[in-house]
Image (spheres, helix red, strand yellow):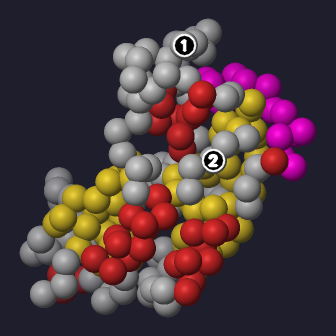
Amino acid sequence: MPEFFVVTNADPPWGDYGDILWNGLSRRDPPGTAVKLSRSGPYVPPLTLPFGEIVVVDSLRRALEAGRFTGFEFSEAQYENVVRIDWQAWDASSLEPPRYPETGEPEDYILKGSHDPSLLRDMPRLWALDVQPTLGLQVHGSSTFRLNRHPGTDIAREHSIFWVSGRLKDAMERSAGGWINFKRVVPR
């Protein structure tokens, strides 16, 4: 049987504060439209996981296209709000970030930060992996899935959980290994 893995974030520094700086926020309003991103900039990791999405930089998109993986298409993500925060220059070994949002809420780095349109010229082109959800795929309360409901593709999802084949895992690790983790799952 082929191997399958759940895609998760690597452990960011500073917990939820690092998570929001790495991944930002995303929305599709209404569902089925382009992903709109609010995030820090100008640096963007090669693969990010804003809640319920997988977003990749253009070079990773090209590598994934060359691999002829199944189960997704690409749609260009749109920047909605970009806040200048040079977080990648912060000391990642520190237990706390050098500064917190005034409210203390991690998402307020972005939500309460000032949009800087001058950043857009330095921001990479980003792409969302559009993966159609498979209802009833996830085994309730777990990170595994029902094999008899799997669509037989390199990636499948239900809600905000993404399962990838070993082949797709390897391709993602080659380009974004320090930013994501994979947990092996055994389908039921």
Disc 2 marks a residue whose amino acid type is: Val
Please tell me which residue is depicted at 62% across the width and 51% down the height of the picture: 27
Quadrant location of residue 29?
bottom right
Counting from the top left corner in percent of width and height, residue 128 is at 60, 65
Q: Which residue is mark 2?
A: 44
Q: Residue at x 28, y 59 (%)?
A: 182
Q: Secondary structure at mark 1?
A: loop
39, above or below 109, in the image: below
Is any part of residue 178 visible from this angle?
yes
Q: Quadrant of residue 148?
A: bottom left
The local crowd at label 1, few if under 14, some if 14 to 19, many if 20 or more residues have their Cα within 10 Å, is few
Q: Which residue is label 1 attached to?
A: 98
Q: Are marks 1 and 2 in contact (CB under 8 Å)?
A: no
Q: Is residue 73 above or below residue 43?
A: below
> Which residues are drawn in magenta?
108-121
Q: Is-magenta flag for residue 14? A: no
Most frequent secondary structure within the magenta stretch: helix
Mark 1–mark 2 distance (CA, rounded to whole Å): 19 Å
Which residue is farthest top?
A: 102
Seen from the viewer's position, the closer of residues 93 and 113 is: 93
